[in-house]
Image (spheres, coloured by chain):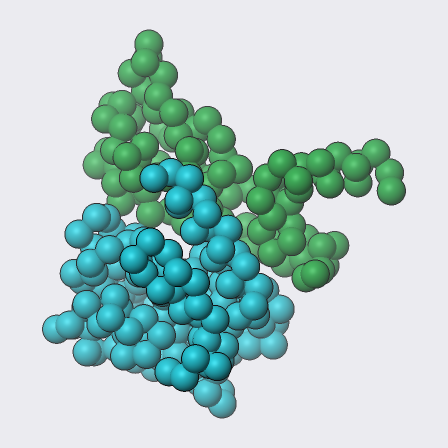
Chain colours: A cyan, B green
Amino acid sequence: MKAAEFLELQFDKFRLRVPKDCWYAGYDTWVRVEGDEALVGVTDFFQTKLGDIVGLAAVENASLEQDDVLATLESVKAAVDITVPASGKIITFNKALDDRPELVNQDPHGDGWIARLRLTDWQADQAMLLSPERYFKLMQDKVAKELERT
Amino acid sequence: MGAKDDALQDLAERYQLYLGIPRQMIPWYPIIDAEKCVGCKECIKFCHDTVYAVDEEKRKVYVEDPWHCQVYCQSCTHACNKDAITFPDRREVKATIRNLREKYPPA
């Protein structure tokens, strides 16, 4: 990824990236639209907070509305539900994660994507999402809150 | 700006906004079944958002600050071995947020 393509924040020993070609939900998931389809996944901040990911359990529903639970990610710290940022029919979950769930840690906005959807209500969904710049600001606030705790 | 708007503005300043909406207007928070709760505190260990607190006398956990709960997060339910935690219906909350979004458009 070229530097111009993402916003970046240093957090402890981590560099948290926010690609500019995605839309974001406040609950730290992203959606990258490709025509009438989209990839969805979790953000760099989310995977950093969650720690080493060891598994993913997908929902069985083929159709989801925005803000429905998409899957449960299991890390060495906890099991956490992830929420889908856009409505759609699931085309596929990322099969590479079956054997290599750590891809979510290594490349959350790339090879670590969670699911591919056929979008069903993008125009309405988009109004409920954050631009990269607005999510970056929200992420800064969340990082500050995390640092207060430590 | 009326008294109601002043009150909402005050809330917005005291609490984080969600999509520009004062958090206290969004009915998303955990509900604990006191009959099922055994006071193990696993939910408190899991949730970093100071939502929960423990009543040492009753040896039960209670929801101290529902407005610190992350909207749509319900992962603490996985931490509870007694299934004592539930959340409001997502679809209803989503409808509420969409209605509120008309009143509080994105900045």
The answer to whether B38 is drawn above or below residue A78 in the figure is above
Q: Position of residue A113 (x, y in %)?
A: 32, 75
Rendered residue at 47%/57% (across/down): A139
Q: Position of residue A118 (x, y in %)?
A: 43, 82
Rendered residue at 75%/34% (across/down): B7
Rendered residue at 79%/40% (across/down): B5
Rendered residue at 50%/77% (across/down): A20
Asked if one can make out residue A63 in the rendered structure from this viewpoint, the answer is no
Residue at the outermost bottom position? A35
B59 on left or right of A65: left
Q: Quadrant of residue A60?
A: bottom left
B77 on left or right of A75: right
From the viewer's side, name the closer residue of A98 and A118: A98
- For the C terminus of chain B, the image quarter is bottom right
The answer to whether B83 is drawn above or below residue A12 in the figure is above
Q: Position of residue B91 (x, y in %)?
A: 51, 55
- For the N terminus of chain B, the image quarter is top right
Tally of numbered discs? 0
Q: Position of residue B34 (x, y in %)?
A: 35, 23
B26 on left or right of B43: right
Q: Quadrant of residue A63?
A: bottom left
The answer to whether B98 is drawn above or below residue B93 in the figure is below
From the viewer's side, name the closer residue of A39 and A60: A39
Residue at the outermost top position? B57
From the viewer's side, name the closer residue of A145 and B20: A145
